[in-house]
Amino acid sequence: MQIYCSAFFCEFELEIEKIKKATIDPISQAKLVLQYIQIKLKELFKWLKKYIFNSVEDEIHFFKELKIKITSKYILYKKILEIELKSPSNSKKLKIKHYEKALDICYQFSKKDKEFYKYFRSGSSYNDHLYFIRNSDKEIINSDIILINFDKKLCTSHDLKLASIIANDILEIYLEEKIEQIKNSCNTKHPVVKSKLTWTGTKIEMVELIYSLYYQKMFNGGNTGIKEIAEEFSRAFNIQLDNSIYRCFTDIKNRPDPKGKFLNGLSENLDENINDEFD
């Protein structure tokens, strides 16, 4: 398995990067990527139908770690193609609303299967033998992505769900960057007054703080986007965030619970210092 899969997925990733560099148009790019993935999926499934795993651990590794590399991209680019085909062509304002609506759907994604979502985010493995081993008696939830989930010999009960979570994470970043690109093209740059305050914590701690304030709707009644808040924090505390804020937030979401490690530490430190004043 290791020899075949190493060569297969290495070639796959290289070819995807070539396609992405060959065209910057998102619709053309998505179509080319999907065409290529369809070919590679059929190739992978042909091998999988004949292959016998040496152990349960090998089978879990394949469906939990390897297969999702290709199926998550199929789901991702299928969604990108659908979003871009429906995107308004003229109005920047309507484009932003279109992407924001798609982004809101992404944010609601975690509510679909909370138990498995929490299982994955916490880095758990105690149910891997149930989720990532093929079993003809298990119910496999089919979706419109028939190519991925059409044969119980080729999928488990949860590998598509896992691929969907990963695709959703990347789609969030894609949409947030699209929105900010449009907003930045509309904004007039103003001279920046350098702040006297410099953030000396880590970037990911800053991101944790920003997202907590964003979800709490602490700025402009909740009508301010993440990127705008991040830009204000960048100016106020001399820290460069840019689009890395989305990648940092993905890292936060992938933490084992509790997610708000920095915020929990702030709360504990505040309580300790207040209590010390009364001792």
Image (spheres, grey):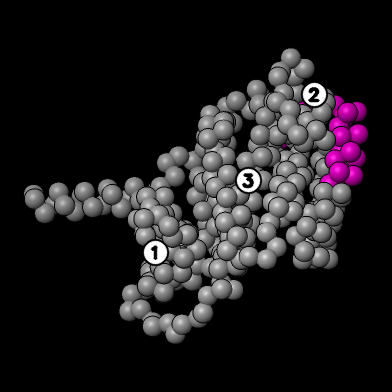
Where does the magenta region start and end? Answer: 37-61
Amino acid under disc 2: Lys
Residue 238 pos. (x, y %)? 41, 74
Q: Nearer the viewer, residue 20 or 66?
A: 20
Nearer the observer: mark 2 or 3; the answer is 3
In the picture, measured across the screen, residue 21 lies left or right of residue 166, that is right
Left or right side of 237 for 228: right
Q: Residue at x 35, y 78 (%)?
A: 195
Note whether 187 is above or below 78 in the view shown.
below
Q: What mark, if any, has residue 168 been given in the picture? A: 3
Q: Position of residue 9 (x, y in %)?
A: 81, 48
Q: Secondary structure at mark 1?
A: loop
What SS does tag 3 mark? helix
Residue 59 falls within the magenta-colored stretch: yes
Q: Are marks 2 and 1 in contact (CB under 8 Å)?
A: no
Q: Where residue 185 appears, x then y in whole percent?
A: 59, 73
At horizontal 82% and vertical 26% (from top left) the residue drawn is 151
Q: Which mark is residue 201?
A: 1
Q: Looking at this view, is 170 or 187 the one in front?
A: 187
Residue 152 numbered tag: 2
N-terminal of the two: label 2 or label 3?
2
